[in-house]
Image (tube, helix red, strand yellow):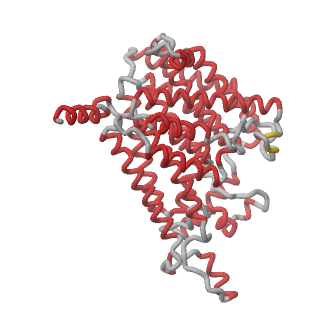
Amino acid sequence: MGAISRFFATAVFVLAPLPLGSLDLAWICFWNFLLVCSLLTADLSAVSRRNAALLIPSAVVVAMVGILVALQMWSSAPPAHSATVWELPRQIFGIALPDRPSVTARGPWLAFGSVLLMSLAFTRAVILASDAGAARSLLQVMAWAGFLYALYGIMAELIAPDMILFRQKEAYLGFATGTFVNRNTSATFWGTCALLFLVPLLRSMHRRQDGEPPTSQDLRSRLGQIFATSAALGAGFAICTIALAMTGSRAGLLLSVGAFVLAIILYLMPLELGGSRKWLLLGGSAAAGLVLLQLVGGLVAGRIVEHGLIDPQRLAAYQASAGIIADHPLLGIGLGNFEAVFSSYRPVALGSLGIWDRAHSTPLEIAVELGIPAFALIAALSLWYFYHLFTGSLRRKRDRFIPIIGTSVAVLGVSHSCIDFSLQIPGYGVFFAAIVGCGLAQSLPSQFRKERGNSVQVELKST
């Protein structure tokens, strides 16, 4: 059962980006079902008390969001929390309408499926990656899956630039999007995949060996050793970076290169290299980031020159979103209701073109839909996890590259979602949650992760 459970989890992590980012509700339900089955049959023997404790705050926040969604759907809410959109039909037409905070009847419950999917992916990844060997295998599988997605994105743009899988491409013509509809999400995804190659590549070059020696001579071990060579890792990083550049995403490329530099710095900082050599390597890392930006950033540089770094339309949308928060500070407007409410707050500066179905800032949209208290709690949880990831990246001895991957991917995904909505796309959100959960599970010192095994041995001896 344990092997089947791991297979289900890995299949969800790897395949979620495939069906156009899994935006359809049917895919969200299907991935949730597979993850629930995987969790119910998971092997918990490698999970220590400290790793289990990492999941408690996440479970509390998800439960809080569920309770909040129920309150938003409550048809007899106090008038102070009722949606202001109900006032106009009441006053003009005298229609009896509910006093619920949500402006849609089922929107919050449907949107909660995506929240549940990310939390299940994160939880399953933490449990699976509590074993270091399983964590290494999972990251390797996800890296090469990302390589295949990047290779497809490049080939699709060269051979059939007007198609996405088997559908006609309607937007972002002339730019690679892979299996995603939005190029910005594709850029963040491929930047994440590039990090899955970059950090193991640094580890391989530092140790001056091509991967770990296989424990057996079977085909799986040999393939694992081949895929862990410096040449293979370098090729994977190059393909993912080329696909990233072909998206033409300004924020996606700039933030990805920043995450590459961060990963290099985190890897080099704890090493005993001598002061001058360490500073030389750190400066060289920053210079390498700038060179990489020059080499692959031609499309992006042109867009920056033409449009600049700051989008005035997004600033106008952010100001309108702040107005929504001011009117609904406690319970928000209802999870998943941004598109339904934004039209009544839409500023003149946005004109009549464009559909604003998202705030283009995930933290801002959370505050709009769930209210300020829920946003503060989610932000506190995120900062707490960031603390563990950073400390694990600097303090771990063995397998330190795993929390470094988790940290750099977390910084990339969260920073990009502050100015866009990549984490709100389930296909990337699941991929992101799995990597961060993997890094978090391996962020604790080895002695903490061995507590479970020691306690089991004591129990066996006593019986």
Q: Nearer the viewer, residue 120 or 97?
A: 120
Label total for image? 0
Drawn side of residue 263 relative to residue 21, left or right: left
Eyeballing the image, is 208 above or below 184? above
Note whether residue 6 is visible: yes
Residue found at the far left of this picture: 462
Quadrant for residue 323, please give it. Answer: bottom right
Q: Is 349 left, or right, of 400 in this rendering?
A: right
Look at 59% across and 28% down and name the residue there: 194
Q: Quadrant of residue 296?
A: top right
Question: In percent of the image, x 48 and y 39: which residue is there?
Answer: 5
The image quadrant where one finds the C terminus is top left
Residue 291 location (% of width, % of height): 64, 22
Q: Give the residue furthest to the bottom.
A: 94
Whole-percent x and y of residue 335?
Answer: 56, 62
> Which x, y percent locates residue 153?
72, 33
Q: Is residue 91 left or right of residue 262?
A: right
Relative height, residue 405 to residue 422 (above, below): above
Where is residue 341 drawn, in percent x and y? 64, 67
Instruction: Give the quadrant of the N terminus.
Output: top left
State the residue at coordinates (61%, 33%): 191
- Please tell me in which quadrant of the rendered image residue 243 appears: top right
Looking at the image, can residue 411 be seen?
A: no
